[in-house]
């Protein structure tokens, strides 16, 4: 039975960035020529060693070094307990931000272990260029040297080229192309995208008969189809309306349901649900969203007004869904909604009360009755 550890959110730690990433290489000079002469990364440090202090021998990990010993190499007994005899050389090639890519030549002509199947693209190292011009210049240099290069490929926020080094390591050279606003929106969506993937992955596991992942305490993680585990908010109340429309347009029930607070209330629409009852709680809200998605809809929405008070906000929206009913006939649903949103502890917003036709003109009267 597989298990996945869970962790409490950690406080900020003083990890400032990447220092170096290390691989094995089959020949240090061949690797140096590729990285220093061809790619232009200077060799800034090389160290030859007979023993590797960080490689524990088989058996239990040793304890701390003996009292008073600050230079581990000066204490043979500690080396005997902790190190591995392995003559090697390690090289460091520096990048423009001070980080390094490093290589071990162990003298055996072997390289880094490769992914055993055709998906060799998954394990790769991505390096950054300053501009598209620099990206094209590196591609031209690699191509002239006989290196096969794929790209540039536009990946929405970056453009990248891909190639292999002499050791079979997949390299990517990329340059950012997204605006700060686009990066911010993608950052806000990141957790939501992970949850959508996990929902899909669990469904595939169930279909294949694979066991569900169990938590370390022995409890079973419930699938999103039976109970929503995670609520994923949007950066603002207005974007909740937009993201809901996008979820409907993608026919993604889970993405739509994830925009609602676990204690949310939704008024159902007669045109869609065959009545105007109230849905409360994750399961009922998911069924409500599934009815919309069942129309195979395209939804357009506009938010006319937003009022924020502390951790709550109210929006007035106008929305239009065009889809297909259960008999295959075109259908159109058009209403003016009122929504109350709640801010989560992480600063994102979710629906708390959703009345999809709460602002319709059909509620209006010529004049209110006399109040005593």
Image (cartoon, helix red, strand yellow):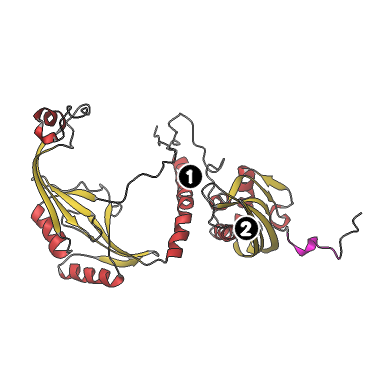
Q: Position of residue 313 (x, y in %)?
A: 64, 55
Please say whether residue 94 is one of the residues in the magenta stretch.
no
Foreground pick, 164 / 354? 354
Residue marked by disc 2: 295
Quarter holding the C terminus is bottom right
Q: Residue at x 53, y 56 (%)?
A: 235
Q: Is residue 84 visible?
A: no
Q: Is residue 235 left or right of residue 215?
A: right
Q: For the N terminus, which image quadrant?
A: top left
The relative height of residue 258 versus residue 370 in the rendered view (above or below) is above
Q: Position of residue 248 (x, y in %)?
A: 57, 58
Residue 222 lies, in percent from the top left, at 52, 37
Report helix, strand or loop for mark 2: loop
- Res. 212 in view: yes
- Identify the main secondary structure in magenta: loop
Highlighted magenta segment, given as a residue range: 359-366
Q: Which of 52/248 is in front?
A: 52
Q: Is residue 204 left or right of residue 242?
A: left
Residue 68 lies in quadrant? top left
The 10 Å Cα crowd at callout 1, few under 14, some 14 to 19, many 20 or more, is: some
Foreground residue, 227 or 185? 185
Which of the two residues, 281 or 239, is positioned nearer the viewer here? 239
Corner quadrant of residue 337: bottom right
Disc nearer the start of the sequence (1/2) = 1
Circle 1 residue = 203
Residue at the image point whose x is 40% and y is 36% from the top: 5
Locate residue 363 relative to residue 263 in the image: left or right: right
């Amino acid at each position: 039975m597989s298990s996945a550890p869970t962790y409490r959110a950690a406080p900020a730690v003083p990890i400032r960035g990447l220092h170096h990433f290390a691989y094995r290489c089959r020949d240090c000079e061949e690797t140096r020529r590729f990285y220093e002469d061809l790619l232009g990364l200077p060799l800034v440090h090389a160290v030859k060693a007979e023993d590797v202090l960080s490689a524990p021998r088989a058996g239990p990990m040793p304890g701390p070094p003996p009292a008073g010993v600050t230079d581990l190499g000066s204490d043979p007994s500690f080396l005997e307990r902790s190190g591995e005899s392995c003559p090697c050389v390690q090289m460091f090639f520096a990048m423009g931000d001070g980080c390094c890519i490093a290589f071990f030549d162990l003298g055996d002509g072997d390289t880094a272990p490769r992914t055993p199947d055709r998906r060799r693209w998954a394990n790769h190292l991505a390096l950054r260029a300053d501009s598209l011009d620099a990206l094209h210049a590196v591609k031209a240099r690699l191509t002239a040297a006989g290196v096969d290069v794929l790209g540039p490929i536009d990946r929405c926020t970056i453009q990248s080229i891909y190639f292999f080094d002499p050791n079979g390591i997949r390299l990517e050279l990329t340059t950012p192309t997204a605006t700060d606003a686009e990066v911010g929106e993608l950052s806000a969506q990141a957790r939501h995208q992970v949850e959508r993937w996990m929902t899909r992955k669990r469904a595939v596991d169930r279909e294949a008969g694979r066991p569900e992942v169990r938590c370390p305490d022995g409890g079973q993680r419930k699938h999103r189809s039976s109970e929503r585990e995670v609520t994923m908010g949007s950066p603002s109340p207005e974007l909740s309306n937009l993201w809901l429309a996008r979820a409907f347009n993608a026919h993604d029930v889970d993405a739509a349901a994830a925009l609602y607070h676990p204690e949310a209330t939704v008024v159902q629409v007669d045109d869609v649900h065959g009545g105007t009852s109230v849905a409360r709680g994750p399961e009922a809200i998911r069924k409500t969203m599934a009815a919309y998605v069942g129309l195979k809809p395209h939804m357009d929405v506009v938010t006319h007004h937003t009022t924020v008070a502390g951790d709550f906000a109210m929006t007035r929206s106008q929305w239009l869904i065009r889809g297909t009913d259960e008999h295959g006939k075109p259908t159109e649903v058009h209403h003016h909604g009122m929504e109350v949103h709640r801010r989560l502890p992480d600063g994102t917003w979710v629906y708390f009360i959703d009345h999809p036709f709460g602002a319709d003109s059909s509620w209006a009267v010529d004049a209110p009755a006399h109040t005593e």
